[in-house]
């Protein structure tokens, strides 16, 4: 088949490195090249076409990228080959940087799930939001050097994770029902996953930045499936953050970018950021002391958030802080105890109350009864109210907290003996609880038997 005469002039002129076409002609030229590729899958002219695209991008890589992003969906094999051609070329890094800029611009212009870029219209922003993650995936896949991808991670990670968060939509406002401690109920995977292209791009980017065994670990733990599930997204963020910390991929740039989401107009981004910092509290040396204390303050503040899932992640973050930053916790003891006690009274969401009780158990172990002061009695009285609660997660968490209270009640023996006398039947019945998580929590009774003796 003969090439169109116009394409002959363009390709031949480019190969001779003559004066390139203007940026205004790029969409037309690229359209001709792409059309020819579709009719020449087995032709010897195909390498010539790819060479023409590379040379065109050498003079106008931004217009070339813009034009390719406007290709109609679904992205066909020829379009993917064009992206890979650009990724393999000497312009690969420049192309990826420009795509990263487009990703950041999309995040700034579309702060939430109701933004126009996520609506099924035919605007430029809407089309680019659908083709952008595919383009990033193809370029990253063939980029010759992994170090270049790693350098861009502080920008790519927030950009891709932010889009995953926003595209999930309003279902994200539901509390996460699965807990890493194995106490929360499993949730079914979402069938409709409009965020999958961004999640897949994120997985591919990380595959160039860490060893394969870590990617397998994320997959086995269900991190990628959780990220795409509105009801488990927060747990997915915690799992992902944990692996990023182990691979030393949580840089100052990543921390700064996600800290901006804490005050975002998007509740989804606020939840994603709160889950990220909740897990980050496991490694407080990552943050400067001043910033660490400010994050503690944010977590305390988020314990009163209007979204229950955010309140749960805030409580989890406070629990991690108790274990890894005890000195800072002691300085903010009153505010943290108040936040967790408020969580116990959260009747609208069992998960928040359960998470608060698990965290309070950590606080009791660290501070003991004397360190809790008058809060010790209030917590003990509030906890026993959950011994016969219908949700299993509440009963299990309540017995775990009561065990911690019993083991540290040396200075409150007479008070605790009276409390045990009032709840002894419930404490014994929990051993026959139909839920194994509750019935296996035997520690409370063993502690209480010794504490209740006069």
Image: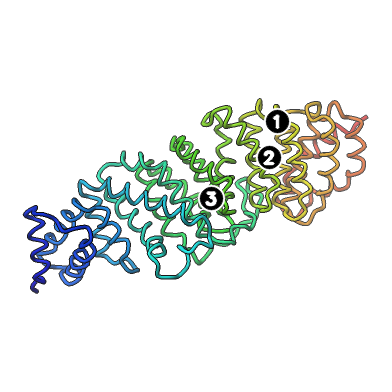
Give the left or right position of residue 101, taking residue 279 as reference: left
Which of marks 2 and 1 precedes in the sequence?
A: 2
Question: In the image, which is nearer the foreground, mark 3 or mark 1?
Answer: 1
Residue closest to the eye, 27 or 296: 27
Which label was assigned to residue 300?
2
Marking on residue 236: 3
Give coordinates of residue 181: x percent, y percent: 63, 45
Could you say which quadrant of the image residue 177 lies in? Answer: bottom right
* Helix, strand or loop status at disc 1: loop
Mark 3 or mark 1: name the one nearer the start of the chain: 3
Q: Secondary structure at mark 3?
A: helix
Tell me the quarter of the picture where residue 16 sits: bottom left
In x, y percent, where is residue 130? 40, 62
Compute the Cα span from label 1 to label 2: 10 Å
**Could you say which is closer to the camera, residue 443 or residue 295?**
295
Query: In the structure shown, which secondary structural element does the residue marked by tag 2 occupy?
Result: helix
Q: Which mark sits nearer the N-terminus, 2 or 3?
A: 3
Q: Give the percent coordinates (x, y) of residue 87.
A: 25, 51
Is 333 left, or right, of 15 in this rendering? right
Give the colour scheme of this rendering.
rainbow
Q: Position of residue 133 (x, y in %)?
A: 38, 56
Marks 3 and 1 sit apart, C-alpha to C-alpha, by 29 Å
Q: Residues within 10 Å of mark 1 (few under 14, many from 20)?
A: some
């Amino acid at each position: 088949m003969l090439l169109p005469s116009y394409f002959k002039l363009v390709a031949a002129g480019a190969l001779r490195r003559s004066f390139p076409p203007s940026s205004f002609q790029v969409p037309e030229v690229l359209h001709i090249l792409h059309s020819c590729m579709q009719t020449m899958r087995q032709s010897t002219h195909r390498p010539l076409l790819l060479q023409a695209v590379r040379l065109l991008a050498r003079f106008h890589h931004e217009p070339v990228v813009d034009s390719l992003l406007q290709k109609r969906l679904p992205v066909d094999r020829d379009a993917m080959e064009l992206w890979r051609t650009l990724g393999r070329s000497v312009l690969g890094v420049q192309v990826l940087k420009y795509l990263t800029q487009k990703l950041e611009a999309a995040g700034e212009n579309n702060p939430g799930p109701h933004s126009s870029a996520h609506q099924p219209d035919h605007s430029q922003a809407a089309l680019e939001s659908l083709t952008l993650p595919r383009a990033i995936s193809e370029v990253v896949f063939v980029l010759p050097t992994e170090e270049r991808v790693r350098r861009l991670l502080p920008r790519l990670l927030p950009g891709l994770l932010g889009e995953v968060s926003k595209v999930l939509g309003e279902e994200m406002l539901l509390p996460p029902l699965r807990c890493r401690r194995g106490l929360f109920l499993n949730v079914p995977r979402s069938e409709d996953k409009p965020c999958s292209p961004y999640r897949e791009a994120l997985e591919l980017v990380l595959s160039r930045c860490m060893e394969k065994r870590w990617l397998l670990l994320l997959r086995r733990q269900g991190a990628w499936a959780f990220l795409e599930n509105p009801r488990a997204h927060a747990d997915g963020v915690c799992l992902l953050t944990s692996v990023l910390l182990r691979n030393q991929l949580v840089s100052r740039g990543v921390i700064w970018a996600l800290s901006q989401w804490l005050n975002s107009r998007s509740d989804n981004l606020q939840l994603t950021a709160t889950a990220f910092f909740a897990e980050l509290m496991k490694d407080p040396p990552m943050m400067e002391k001043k910033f660490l204390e400010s994050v503690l303050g944010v977590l305390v503040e988020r314990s009163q958030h209007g979204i229950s899932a955010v309140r749960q992640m805030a409580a989890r973050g406070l629990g991690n802080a108790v274990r890894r930053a005890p000195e800072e916790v002691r300085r903010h003891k009153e505010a943290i105890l108040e936040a967790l006690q408020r969580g116990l009274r959260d009747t609208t969401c069992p998960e928040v109350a359960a998470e608060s009780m698990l965290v309070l158990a950590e606080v009791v172990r660290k501070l003991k009864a004397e360190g809790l002061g008058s809060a010790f009695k209030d917590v003990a009285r509030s906890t026993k109210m959950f011994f016969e609660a219908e949700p299993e997660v509440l009963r299990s968490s309540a017995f775990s907290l009561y065990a911690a209270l019993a083991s540290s009640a040396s200075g409150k023996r007479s008070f605790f003996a009276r409390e045990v006398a009032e709840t002894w039947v419930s404490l014994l019945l929990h051993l026959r609880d139909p839920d194994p998580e509750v019935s296996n929590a035997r520690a409370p009774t063993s502690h209480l038997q010794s504490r209740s003796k006069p």
